Amino acid sequence: MKRTRVRACLRALLVAAVAVPLLAVPQQASADTNSFRGVNWADGRDNYVDGWVIPTGLASGDSYSAVKSKADGIISGFQSKLGANTVRLPINPKSVNSDWWARYKGAADSALGKGMKVIFGYWEANKDGKVDDTNAWNTMWDKVTGDYKGNGNVYFEPMNEPFGYSLNDWVSVCSGWLSRHSGISRGRVIISGTGYNDNVTGVGGASALNGTLLSLHFYGYWANDTTRAAWTTNLSNRLGSYSSRTIIDEAGAPMTTGLTYNGTAQDGNTFTAYFAATTELARSRRMGVVYWPGLRAGDSYSITRQSGAGLAVNNPSAVAQLRRGWGL
């Protein structure tokens, strides 16, 4: 997710590509992932919390009915204000292996009841890019998959940003997850790219992960380029030949600084060029995008804010460009 972490920026800059003209980027075959038009709903403290994850607008003392009621307003806002049909929700063992889970499920159930897709993604607490406690992680996923394996609109992302693992070790972790949950279709499992989810070429080429979806994260603070062409090349190199399996399930930019994201003046500014390149490439390759964040208190990237029981848009021009990327 978007956060002030220098090592993430430095690592991403090291793998950034040299720009080539936009028209030189090869087109990929049509993909199925453009059915994911989504947003992240995140904890204002950051999802890397050592405790319950509580997305903005919810409270630890909420009952199931209170969570669901609050979520109804927020989910409806994602749908009506943005056109979203997917929400990505954070989980961790302390949230699921406790009484909070029975109540927190109201958020997912609200989305599912409104016809949305739900992506459950695991965030670790130690911030070292590895599963904190394998036994607790397995218990968590046993419970989550047990509750939602019967609903085809629910997708499972074993871990967010596995930067502590080598490619081989990460493939091994994912292979173990797939074996343990073999009753779940691989098409409902989303495997994070290596590093900070910043490259899917390794996991895409791993035969042990065939049939799964892939997730990529991509942010405008990872480079200083100010042209769509340069950002398009940067993103294309991270995708390799795996666009058809990939969902960009985190991408975002400043929403409260007065930038205009749609129109003809997208080059010349790092963030407008980045956002245009990301959304246009997603549109042309028919890839899904899950914006970071749809709602998160205190985050200047949040594309909406709470307004009464619903939501208000922070940057209409960004919404227009995001919707274009979604193919709307």
Image: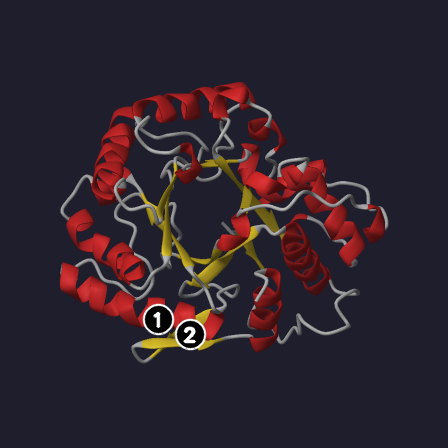
Query: Three-letter amino acid code at disc 1?
Result: Ser
| Image coords of residue 298 (percent x, y) | 43, 65
CA neighbours of label 1 inside 10 A, class few (<14), some (14 to 19), many (20+)? some
Measured as percent of width and height from the top left, residue 136 is found at: 25, 30
- Mark 2 and mark 1 in contact? Answer it, CB < 8 Å: yes
Residue shown at 62% from the left, 44% from the top: 9
Front-most of residues 182 and 156: 182
Residue 29 in sight in this render: yes
Q: Is residue 272 left or right of residue 87?
A: right
Residue placed under numbered mark 1 in the picture:
76
Q: Please, what secondary structure does the residue beneath circle 2 have?
A: helix
Disc number placed over residue 49 in the picture, else none: none
Say above or below: 253 vs 286.
below
The residue located at (37%, 30%) in the rendering is: 131
Q: Secondary structure at mark 1?
A: helix
Image coords of residue 244 (percent x, y): 59, 41
Q: Residue at x 64, y 58 (%)?
A: 279
Q: Quadrant of residue 91?
A: top left
The dot on residue 80 is 2
Would residue 17 be found to the left or right of residue 84 on screen? right
For badge 2, the amino acid type reads Ser
Position of residue 113 measured from the top left corner of the image (x, y, whole percent):
27, 61
**How far is disc 2 from disc 1 in space, using C-alphas?**
6 Å
Q: Quadrant of the C terminus?
A: bottom right
Q: Is residue 77 left or right of residue 17?
A: left
Q: Residue at x 53, y 48 (%)?
A: 33
